[in-house]
Image: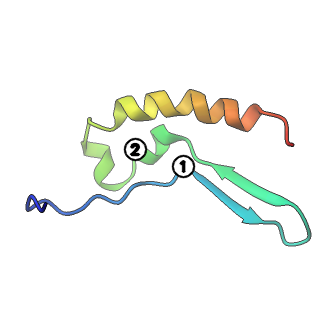
Amino acid sequence: MRTGKPARRASTNVTVEAAPVSGTIIRIADPAIMLGIGEFASDPLPAPVAGEARPRLTRAAAAPAR
């Protein structure tokens, strides 16, 4: 259903790519920084989600590689 508002694009906090030689590169963005960019900067609605996501992403980043 269209509401007349433009569709929002979800930001990506995690990207995974193949390393040039071998292995994997995982990049994790800070959700609070992501919210300071573009249209998210003036919208208070996603802030609680970012606050919830950051500790989870931090734990994932600190987990040992398997």
Question: In the picture provided, is 17 more to the left or to the right than 65?
Answer: left
Tell me the element at label 2. helix
* Residue 51 picture location, percent across and down: 45, 28
Give the Cα separation between the discs numbered 1 and 2.
11 Å
* Residue 19 picture location, percent across and down: 82, 66
Question: In the picture provided, is 48 more to the left or to the right than 31?
Answer: left
- The N terminus appears in which quarter of the rendering? bottom left
Residue depicted at x 48% and y 43%: 33
* Amino acid type, callout 2: Leu
Q: Who comes first in sequence, dot 1 or dot 2?
A: 1
Residue depicted at x 35% and y 60%: 9
Closer to viewer: mark 1 or mark 2: 1
Question: In the picture provided, is 44 more to the left or to the right than 2?
Answer: right
Splitting the image into 4 quarters, where does residue 58 fall? Answer: top right
Q: Extreme left residue here?
A: 4
Residue depicted at x 39% and y 55%: 10
Residue depicted at x 35% and y 33%: 47
* Amino acid type, callout 1: Asn
Residue 58, label in figure: none
45 is higher (above) or lower (below) than 26: above
Q: Nearer the viewer, residue 60 or 33?
A: 60
* Residue 17 picture location, percent across and down: 72, 64
Q: Within 10 angstroms of label 1, few (less than 14), some, or many (20 or more) residues?
A: some
**In the rendered view, how is the structure colored?**
rainbow
Residue 35, label in figure: 2
Q: Mark 1 points at which residue?
A: 13
Question: In the picture provided, is 30 more to the left or to the right than 3?
Answer: right
* Residue 52 picture location, percent across and down: 47, 28
Q: Extreme right residue here?
A: 21
49 is higher (above) or lower (below) than 28: above
